[in-house]
Amino acid sequence: MSEGSARAWFAHSRASGTIAAVGVLLLVVSTAIVLTTPPAAEYEISLYESYPAPFWGCVVGSLFAGALLIFGSIGHPDERSWVFGTVLMLATDALLLLMPLIRGYVMYGDADPLTHLGYVQDIANTGTTGANIYPLAHLLVFATADATGLETMTLAMLIPAVFSAVYFGGMIYLLFQVADSRRGFLLGLPFVLLPILGYSHLLFRPFDFSILLIPVVLYLFFKSQRYPTPAIRAALVLTLLSLLLYHPLTAVFVAGVFMLYYAVQYVPRIRTIYRSPTSSFGLSLAIIVSWYSNFPGVILRFDTIYRVLFGTSSSDAPVQAYAQTAQEGTPALIDIVRFITFRFGTELVLFVLGGGLFGVVFLLTVTERYELDTRTTVMGAVLGVFGIVGLLFLLLDLIVTQERPWQVAKIGGVLLLGPLFHILRSRHRQRSQSLVRSVRSVATVMVLVLVVLSTLTLYPSPLSGMTNDQVTAMEVEGSQWLTEHETGNKELYHFDIEYRRFHHAEHGVSAGLPFWEQFLPAHFNYTTNRYFGQNYDSGKYVMINRKGRIFYQETFPDYPQRWKYTSQDFQRFNRDRTVTRSYDNGDLRIYSANGTRAEGA
């Protein structure tokens, strides 16, 4: 080694050591803040407001320091600091994903996850899965709870973190298959170590579990193309089988990815590598048809999608709800930009950056100046096709939201970035070193942007027009009290809390509900009647939690004219002579309302 080379190596090692020390320090500081902050004593509208801004700065800094360590190993074949950078990023991810448990939440996910706990309760009650469409997730929780003695609600917060660990491991191995070079792998590694899938990293839902398994399935699929050994094929079949049985929609998505792989092999000027006979697409279709055709609910859902697509049925699409809200509220431009950034920012960056880079490299392939390989092209096709499918879900009411196909598109998009940056970097190396540095600088800036976005959009918050999905112990206790003390055949009126979800979690989905639930009228209908009871002929129950009482003030503070409920409305409701407060634990309040419309007063 020459004197100049030795000096450069020493300077690089010292810089890497400094970055590593700073990254560890930031992680230690953020962990100390978490451990010294008291747990949540009541419902908090945003988890991001539970800790000071320096905490989130430390989290972002720790992730970015890990990314810089990985990038620093690109030009040094013997450099191993990328391993430390990977560990640093994964440790920070773990801190982020375990926040609900650390905050002392009883449960995270106040809608579907509670109902899925109800399916677990059904298994405990009956000993069978019955007509459960996707029993694997529920059996997993049931067996783990039985073996460990942990509460099912606690496991509902732990298991998503375990599946996220499987996801990150699968993404690392899958990236190596897609990149097929050390430089491309290291350029892409920081991107795939970010929690870009949002809710899927946090919620106890079979769909989210199945999405987190996709990288493992694709890794084994690509690996079986290169090394078609019986052991790898067997692992692929078992993993594919479990994924397909987790959720029918993910099963269709994965079958679509396999179909894209077969189609790409016949595209001109695409270099096919390690092509081996396989029947993954046919196996996927066989499993989907043989398993899900036994459930009428699945068939009815696909029938609904068919009728919407071909014009025999119509309903409001998600984009119409956004347009109507914007039209009625006339939000300021800054609020629109903020909403788009925090609701769709990660998707926009991945789709624009990944799509743009893939378009440039594909153009080079068409003009015969470069030759794309099958795997990179498949990821580009996944990004494009599922991005468009998600847009279709946004424009049409297809049962589920656009986020579900976009989850698959984001996996394809984030896997593209490293290999494509490497392709551009390699082509510019022969022309100018400054262009090579420019490519790396762009990659570094994009990592920082995605670090910030993936961190600050991981949990829902008022910045995205949403609220925290925290379930409080007081909500659970209040729902149990209502079940035990309900009398008469009364309807239950509520806002932003669904009693049936809590009843599912406690008694099972198959257990009958004691109430028919309805949404409260805006402003309790005080704009029309003097008393709430004048709206009805018979008695009603009313359930209101802290989240409902502060929702509009905290989520849309600048648009009071659009609030459906104000603090004055709640105060008036508490003084209403037709309403009696039957239960109040500081969070959840349950009222009994007397219907007086028949009396005319």
Image (tube, rainbow, N blue to C red):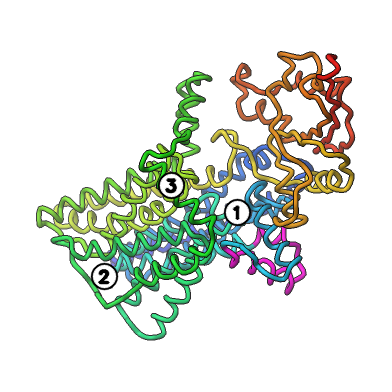
Which residue is identified by label 1?
203
- Left or right: 14 in relation to 296: left
Please name whichever residue, 578 or 355, is drawn nearer the observer in this view of the structure.
578
Residue drawn where x is 89% and y is 44% of the image: 485
Of circles 2 and 1, the one toward us is 1
Instruction: Please say whether residue 150 is one of the residues in the magenta stretch.
Output: yes
Please tell me which of labels 2 and 3 falls first in the chain. 2
SS at circle 2: loop
From mark 2 to mark 1, how far is it between C-alphas?
Answer: 55 Å
* 110 shown above or below 572: below
Please tell me which of labels 2 and 1 falls first in the chain. 2
User: Looking at the image, can residue 15 be seen?
Assistant: no
Q: How far across and down, in percent of the image, does residue 207 sit?
A: 53, 57
Q: Which mark is residue 2?
A: 2
Name the image quarter holding the N terminus: bottom left
Please name whichever residue, 549 or 392, is drawn nearer the observer in this view of the structure.
392
Which residue is identified by label 3?
305
From mark 1 to mark 3, how far is it between C-alphas?
Answer: 25 Å
Disc 1 residue type? Answer: Leu
Residue range highlighted in magenta: 134-158
SS at circle 1: loop
- Left or right: 499 in relation to 363: right
Residue drawn where x is 47% and y is 76% of the image: 238
Name the quadrant containing residue 161: bottom right
Q: How far across and down, in percent of the image, does residue 275 sit?
A: 24, 75
Disc 3 residue type? Answer: Ile
From mark 2 to mark 3, how far is it between C-alphas?
Answer: 67 Å
User: Looking at the image, can residue 112 be seen?
Assistant: yes
